[in-house]
Image (cartoon, rainbow, N blue to C red):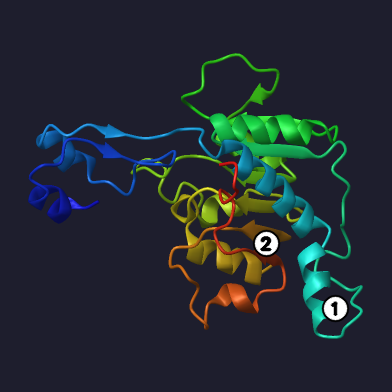
């Protein structure tokens, strides 16, 4: 809902967004016109959180890669992370963004006896999980998972310098918004094996172009922006 749409919609009284964020609405123009913007935070939180757990397991245990190989007639046992295929127990999960989805991800993954830490400068509620700085999270996490809103403040909050802070055995997961991670920097980090892998459900340009570098990488699990899509959401 851009400026042009809002200015020609003369009878528009309210803008309702059936998702957690309002980044697809020009809120400045809506405010200027006195039109309230209403969103639905948490509507698909469980769907996204469950999908995130699936992405993590798929990437670290090579589920999608093995499936793709079998479909091509290959009984594959050799994978890019072959030197380090971990169980989740005792691994450190770093959650960036501790809203409805981030908290559910922490709850779900704690069942695996993981160590949950999170970074969210705006969280001041109660939780049993440990709140840390972004630098501490990146340096200590085995799995980093993104769950923040995309704003001017959070756009490209993870760039090359941040990816270099991560363990070389770590993976990063994004089932939130592509703009949270600078996509080109992530591709380079994966190509150079600066981190072990990634699991990505959202991209700068969708659908992916046929020549997207993501399609050539063997250390990434990619899905077609499915995280929030369930009948229950």
Q: Is residue 181 above or below residue 139?
A: below
- Left or right, 87 with reference to 161: right
> Which quadrant of the view contains residue 199?
bottom right
- Left or right, 134 with reference to 57: left
Q: Residue furthest top?
A: 126
How many neighbours does mark 2 have within 10 angstroms: few (below 14), some (14-19), or many (20 or more)?
many
- Left or right, 148 with reference to 52: left
Residue at image x 57%, y 37%? Answer: 45
Residue at image x 78%, y 70%? Answer: 65
Q: Is residue 227 above or below residue 35?
A: below
The residue tagged 2 is 194
Give me the C-alpha separation between circle 2 and circle 1: 28 Å
Q: Position of residue 233 (x, y in %)?
A: 56, 42
- Left or right, 95 with reference to 25: right
Marks 2 and 1 in Cβ contact (< 8 Å): no
Q: Nearer the viewer, mark 2 or mark 1?
A: 1
Q: Helix or strand or loop: what does disc 1 sit on?
A: helix
Q: Is residue 98 visible?
A: no
Query: Which numbered disc flags the more N-terminal residue, 2 or 1?
Result: 1
Q: Helix or strand or loop: what does disc 2 sit on?
A: loop
Q: Is residue 87 visible?
A: yes
The residue tagged 1 is 70
Q: Position of residue 15 (x, y in %)?
A: 25, 39
Q: Nearer the viewer, residue 77 or 156?
A: 77
How many neighbours does mark 1 have within 10 angstroms: few (below 14), some (14-19), or many (20 or more)?
few
> Which quadrant of the view contains residue 59?
bottom right
Q: Position of residue 18 (x, y in %)?
A: 40, 42
Q: Nearer the viewer, residue 192 or 95?
A: 95
Q: Position of residue 129 (x, y in %)?
A: 69, 23
> Which quadrant of the view contains residue 75?
bottom right
Q: Nearer the viewer, residue 206 or 179?
A: 206
């Amino acid at each position: 809902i851009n400026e042009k749409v809002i200015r020609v919609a003369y009878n528009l009284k309210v803008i309702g967004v059936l998702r957690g964020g309002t980044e697809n609405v020009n809120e400045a123009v809506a405010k200027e016109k006195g039109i309230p913007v209403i969103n639905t935070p948490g509507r698909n939180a469980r769907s996204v959180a469950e999908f995130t757990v699936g992405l993590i397991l798929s990437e670290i245990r090579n589920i999608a890669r093995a499936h793709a190989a079998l479909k091509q007639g290959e009984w594959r046992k050799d994978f890019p992370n072959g030197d380090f295929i971990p169980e989740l127990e005792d691994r450190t999960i770093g959650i960036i963004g501790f809203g409805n989805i981030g908290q559910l991800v922490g709850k779900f993954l704690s069942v695996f006896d993981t160590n949950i830490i999170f970074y969210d400068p705006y969280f001041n509620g109660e939780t049993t999980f440990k709140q840390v700085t972004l630098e501490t999270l990146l340096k200590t996490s085995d799995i980093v998972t993104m769950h923040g809103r995309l704003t001017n403040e959070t756009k490209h909050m993870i760039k090359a310098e941040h990816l270099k802070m991560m363990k070389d055995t770590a993976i990063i997961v994004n089932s939130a918004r592509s703009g949270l991670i600078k996509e080109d920097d992530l591709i380079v980090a994966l190509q150079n094996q600066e981190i072990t892998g990634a699991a990505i459900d959202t991209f700068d340009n969708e659908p992916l172009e046929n020549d997207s570098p993501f399609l050539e990488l063997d250390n990434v699990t990619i899905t077609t922006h499915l995280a929030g899509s369930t009948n229950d959401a």
